[in-house]
Amino acid sequence: MKIGININCYPGVSVEDQIKLMKDNGFEGCFMGSESPVFDDIVKTIQESGIVIETLHAPFTKSRTEPVCDINDMWYEGEKGDAMMARLVTCVEKAGRYNIPVVVVHLSSGLVPPMVNSVGNARFGKLMEVAKENNVTIAYENQRMLGNIAHAFDYYKDAGFCWDIGHESCFTPGREYMPLFGKKLVALHVQDNMGAPADLHLIPYDGIVDFEKAARYIAESGFEGSVMLEVLKKQSNYYDDVTPEEYYKKAAAAARKLADRIEYYKNEKSE
């Protein structure tokens, strides 16, 4: 399996230097957000380097411009919800323009998100239509509410699943998403943590996540994509004394270890 890593995992490193660190350590793919003011320049630099942008992460946090909106506003009538919808549509259109096949979307955020309702259903339904027009797959990511994502998969048959392994550990400990949605898996966010409640985005095998179990689930799903890390140095003090070179090397070794275990279980299944 190929391995990938998110852009800007280590603060202060230029895109050009990130590309070099990725290539030096065997990363062939990456993913990134869609709202950088220099988005087009970054995408072109990455794609010209030969690194594949496998997914875009759709916006979900509060916007920096009026009306201030976040992903929860998708479920409410009004200009904030319309503005959030416009942000998601723009992300999908960017993915289509640059032949990025998957956009990862959150359905909600926080401990007490909005209830599923007809307003949000209509907006996300329209987003699914825009995705189809742009030859993009929407991958809904597990957060805290299993019911929301189960509803989305029932409501939108073309939707895919992005399994965030770390979210399962820190947001919904004891709840397993892959037995429910593994056949819809189209993207991974691979990260580690110390369990609830902190989403630390540690390098795999530095926390408590059972990656052996994760490897079995991924192998059983038939997923053929990359082991895509979503690691963030700034989310903890675990890597305060680690240089960019050391960080990427450690991250690549962890991703390759997981990829090898997935391949092991795939081969075991086929025998």
Image: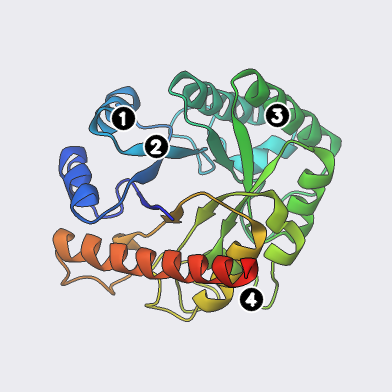
**Dot 3: element:** helix
- Please tell me whether mark 3 or mark 4 is closer to you in this view: 3
Q: Mark 3 and mark 1 in contact (Cβ < 8 Å)?
A: no
Residue type at the position of mark 2 = Ile
- Please tell me whether mark 2 or mark 4 is closer to you in this view: 2
Q: Which residue is mark 2?
A: 53
Q: Mark 1 and mark 2 in contact (Cβ < 8 Å)?
A: yes
**Dot 1: element:** helix
Estimate how packed mark 1 is, as few (under 14), some (14 to 19) or many (20 or more) residues with alpha carbons within 10 Å. Answer: few
The answer to whether residue 71 is above or below residue 191 is: above
The answer to whether residue 109 is above or below residue 74 is: below
Q: Position of residue 270 (x, y in %)?
A: 63, 66
Q: Which residue is mark 4?
A: 173
Q: How far is disc 2 from disc 1 in space, using C-alphas?
A: 7 Å
Q: Which residue is mark 3?
A: 128
Residue type at the position of mark 4 = Pro
Estimate how packed mark 3 is, as few (under 14), some (14 to 19) or many (20 or more) residues with alpha carbons within 10 Å. Answer: many
> Which residue is at the front of the view, 179 or 39?
179
**Which quarter of the figure is the N terminus placed in?**
bottom left
